[in-house]
Each structure stands twice: as structure tokens, then as C-alpha cells.
Amino acid sequence: MSRYRLTNARLLRPEPKNDPSPQDLWIEDREIVAIVPSIQTFTDAPPIKLDLDGDWLSLGGMDLQINGALGLAFPEVTIDSGEKIIEINQFLWTQGVDAYCPTILTAAVSQIQTALAGFDTFKSQSNPRPNQATIAGIHLEGPFLNPAKRGAHPKEHILPLTIDNLKRVLGDYANLVKIITLAPEMAAETGAIEYLKSLGITVSLGHSLATAQQANHAFTSGATLVTHAFNAMPSLHHRTPGLLGSAIVNPNVTCGFIADGQHIAPLMIDILLRASDYDRGLFLVSDALSPLGLPDGHYPWDSRTIEVTHGTARLPDGTLSGTTLGLLVGVQNLMNWGLCDLEQAIAMATITPRIAIQADSNINTAQGRLLRWSKSQPGTWQQIIL
Ligand SMILES: [Zn+2]
């Protein structure tokens, strides 16, 4: 039996929240069996293996919005994609990501069904493996979006929000879907959000022109998230606060955002951070596209082509369609821009996304590794293998 302790670590955990007092982690057979204050002495304490010298330790990241990686776009998954998904899971792990929600963009219902069947087959055939990110559930971004705010989503596959259409899109895979992004003003009847909630699916508002009143109504009906705040929705306006204004002041709503420096100007992120309870109200997403992990260049994207330059992907008409930067690059950017403390930035990539989908965010749920965040180079991290 291997038994040791990591000493002088500051722990990112939901409770007590971002407690800066140094802690010791007792590890037995790769599992955290005790967390005790470093100043306390114990006669049965295991030997010290590593002194963290006050660095923060966290779980790996959780990415709730990622469209693909290593050349595979998740809407193009089929029952034969298993090996590629394993490759992606290994790759994301090396990027510091423990778990993610593969995001399926607006597509024909038959294509969404094929992709869901592919992930379902993968899930039923593969056992969780060490050193691989796991799939926390699918994020359906669409097809219930406002065509006027569709961004890069193909118009012809956008559907009105009805329970019948939801049933068509979900098919037999409702329990595989974790999040649906929808525009609440596209509801052709009442009850869609309540229906999704009854299935255990988290509702995120986005690609929307909802007024503050429409957004409030959706939040009251059970929507709890906002998809890439600021993008594909009206910006904050002093006379028309809209979806975003309504979301920021609602303590039950958590906004995802992209910190690549292209989707939102750092100054606007500063406003978002100052206006929100960052460790409950905001989480980072990558919104990364399928060339994630591949070099800059031209890549196919549904029936179109995107050009990736310095990690930013655009359609030929210049429409921003995503990034190829990983989730934890966002932490580094927030530090480079001097917008928040390191522990706040780490929390937005590791704790808040877990809370947003009711996943366990406790540090002793670590699956074989933790991330150690450098004090001297804020935003850089290394793995600590348990
Ligand atoms: Zn989007």
C-alpha cells in the first residue's frame, strides 16, 4: 500500500471556500483519505512526499462547452468514433481537463441523433480509464435558437421550441444529455423548460434576443445557465438590460464565458467579474472547435471551411465561430490581464462548472491527479499524480 502526504497546499474547494490556510493531504493507494491543517501534528501522519510551499491545488478543469478536438467535430460523431473519442479524452487530460460536455451544434435532427447514438455506444462500451478525461454528458447547443442570433449555426436546421420537437431531438438519449442551450423567446408553447428540467437536463439560455422579462420568466421556469455570456446575445444596454442583465443580477444563474481575448474584450470581462459572484456566478468554457490540438490553418466545418489564426476560428465572411484554445488558457489569460486573483480564476475553470451541472466539486473526488498552480507564474500548472 502506498501511503504518503502532500504538505503546505492551499486547496480550491467549495467549502470552506478558497481557504488560504495550508493543508496536508493524506494519500493512500492514490486516493485522498484525509485533509488536515498543516500546522497540526499527528503521530500517525504518513511521510511527506512533496511540499507544495503554499501553491494552490485543484481538481482538473471541467469544460461544459467544447465542440470537438484533434479534427473530430462532435456533431460528426458516429458509432464508429470510439477510438477517436479515446484519443480526445487522452489529449484533454494532458490539457488539464478532467471532464467535459461534448457540444453538438445545430444540425439536422437525424445528424444529432446519429451523434447521440455514437456517444451512447461509446459510453456503453468503454470503461473509465486512468489518465483520460471523462464525458460528463452532452451539451446540445441548439437547434432551438433565435435565427437572428444564430452566429455560425446553420439557419435551415433551427427549430421552434416545442415539447414535440424536444422529444424528436432527444430521442432515446435524454439521459445522455446534460445541458441544452436554447433561446426562450423561440418557445411556441409553454412548458418546454419545465419538461427539460423534469428530465434532469440543465437549461442554458443563449443565441437569444430575449428581453429581461422573457429571461426572468425562463429562469423562474427552471433555466439556470447562460451560454457564452455577451456572445450571440445583445450586449448590456442601460435601457434594455436583456438576457444578460437579467442573468448577472440573478443569484441562481451562472454564466459561461470565453476568455480568449477575441470573444469578449478583457475590459468587459472585468465588468462581468465585478458584477458577478465569480465563484458561483461565472464559469470559463473553451468553446473550442475541432482543430483544438492541431496547428493554425484551414479546416472543414459542417459544409463550410473555417480559418484558424492564433487560435481564433472564423468563417470566410469573418463571423467568429470559436477558438482552438484549451479551457485552462482562459485561466492564464485572466491572470495576464490582471482581472482577478489566481484562486478566483482557477475556481471558474474547476469548481463553478461542476456546481453548474450539480457535479461533485470536492477535491477528494480527484481521479488520480490534481493540478498544482504556480505562485511565481500565475496561470501555469503542473500535474500532481496521486
Ligand atoms: Zn454558441
Image (spheres, grey):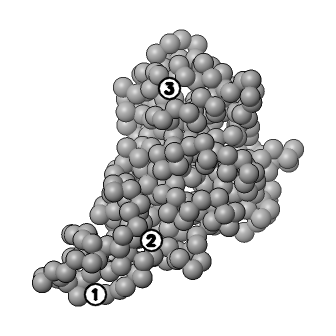
Horizontal side of residue 247 vs 24, given as left or right = right
Residue 253, given in percent of the width and then of the height, sits at 50, 35
Q: Amino acid at mark 3?
A: Phe
Residue that badge 2 annotates: 56
Relative depth, front residue between 121 and 262: 262
Residue in front for this viewpoint, 241 or 318? 241
Residue at 21 percent of width and 69 percent of height: 33
Tell me the crowding category of disc 1: few under 14, some 14 to 19, or many 20 or more residues within 10 angstroms, Cα based.
some
Query: Which residue is denoted by mark 3 in the rendering?
Result: 219
Q: Amino acid at mark 1?
A: Ile
Considering depth in this image, is 41 or 157 the residue closer to the camera?
Answer: 41
Q: For the residue labelled by badge 1, is the local secondary structure a helix, a strand or a loop?
A: strand
What residue is shown with label 1?
Answer: 48
Closest to the camera, between mark 3 and mark 2, is 2
Q: Closer to the N terminus: mark 2 or mark 1?
A: 1
Measured from the top left, where is residue 65 in percent x and y? Answer: 56, 48
Q: Looking at the rendering, in which quadrant would you find the N terminus?
A: bottom left
Q: CA distance from mark 3 to mark 1?
A: 48 Å
The answer to whether 271 is drawn above or below residue 295 in the figure is: above
Label located before the other in sequence (3 or 1): 1
Residue at the extreme left = 43
How far across and down, in percent of the image, does residue 319 sit? Answer: 81, 44
Q: Is residue 254 something one can see in this rendering?
A: yes
Kind of residue at badge 2: Trp
Cα–Cα span, label 2 and label 1? 17 Å
